[in-house]
Image (cartoon, grey):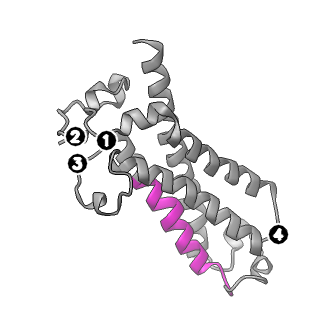
């Protein structure tokens, strides 16, 4: 394996890992807010919502669970497998790339937008800087040339330089997704 393939697999693998870890945190936090909208399960005082339009953490928890939990999980799967689903292409503005590229870019933007909005309503904490950096890292890695090559249309999954453990092992369709 040449150094270009190695860096490629590290970059894509890092994106997948970042998405999975983001989702796990959101499942925990969002789930805790869904189970206890008063925030007591994670010691989040309801007073943090004083300047927000919410009277408890139920709606923010549901949004957190969906947009930073479920969505990044689906994006991580799509980045790993590049499924040949056609329906996401209807909203993919980047036709030269498999739709998983646009979905990964959107995941980073969603994190940045979420934290930026949260900072308007919730007292500032270092965790905000962590997640702003996380979102920026998702966007930056998605724009990396190796990720762009991996997601380019017409690149079969077996020719991406991913380690054998990350390859699906099935032939790719003409648009780079696996069957």
- Picture residue at 68% right of the left edge, 53% below the top: 131
Mark 2 or mark 3: name the one nearer the start of the chain.
Answer: 3
Q: Quadrant of residue 158?
A: top left
Marks 3 and 4 in Cβ contact (< 8 Å):
no
Quote the CA–CA distance across marks 3 and 4.
Answer: 43 Å
Quote the CA–CA distance across marks 1 and 2.
Answer: 7 Å
Q: Dot 4: within a 10 Å radius of its alpha carbon, few (fewer than 14), some, or many (20 or more) residues?
A: few
Marks 2 and 3 in Cβ contact (< 8 Å):
yes
Q: Which residue is more in the foreground, 80 or 89?
A: 89
Q: Which residue is mark 1?
A: 81
- Picture residue at 53% right of the left edge, 61% below the top: 68
- Number of dots carrying numbers: 4
Mark 3 or mark 4: name the one nearer the start of the chain.
Answer: 3
Is 176 on the left or on the right of 91, as rendered?
Answer: left
Q: Which residue is mark 2?
A: 178
Quote the CA–CA distance across marks 3 and 1.
Answer: 9 Å
Q: Which residue is mark 4?
A: 123
Q: Dot 3: within a 10 Å radius of its alpha carbon, few (fewer than 14), some, or many (20 or more) residues?
A: some
Residue 59 among those drawn in magenta: yes
Q: Choose mark 4 or mark 2, whichever is in front.
A: 2
- Highlighted magenta segment, given as a residue range: 55-74
Mark 1 or mark 4: name the one nearer the start of the chain.
Answer: 1
Q: Looking at the picture, does residue 123 appear above or below residue 93?
A: below
Mark 1 or mark 2: name the one nearer the start of the chain.
Answer: 1
């Amino acid at each position: 394996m040449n150094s270009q393939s190695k860096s490629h697999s590290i970059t894509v693998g890092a994106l997948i890992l970042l998405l999975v870890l983001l989702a796990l945190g959101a499942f925990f936090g969002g789930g805790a807010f869904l189970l206890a909208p008063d925030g007591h399960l994670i010691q989040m005082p309801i007073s943090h919502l004083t300047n927000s339009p919410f009277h408890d953490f139920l709606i923010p928890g549901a949004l957190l669970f969906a947009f930073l939990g479920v969505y990044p999980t689906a994006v991580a799967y799509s980045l790993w497998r590049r499924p040949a689903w056609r329906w996401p292409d209807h909203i993919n503005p980047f036709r030269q790339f498999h739709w998983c590229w646009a979905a990964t870019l959107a995941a980073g933007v969603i994190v940045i937008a979420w934290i930026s909005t949260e900072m308007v309503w919730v007292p500032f904490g270092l965790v905000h800087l962590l997640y702003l950096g996380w979102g920026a890292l998702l966007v930056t890695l998605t724009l990396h040339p190796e990720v762009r090559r991996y997601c380019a249309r017409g690149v079969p999954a077996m020719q991406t330089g991913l380690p054998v453990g990350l390859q699906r092992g099935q032939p790719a369709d003409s648009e780079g997704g696996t069957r």
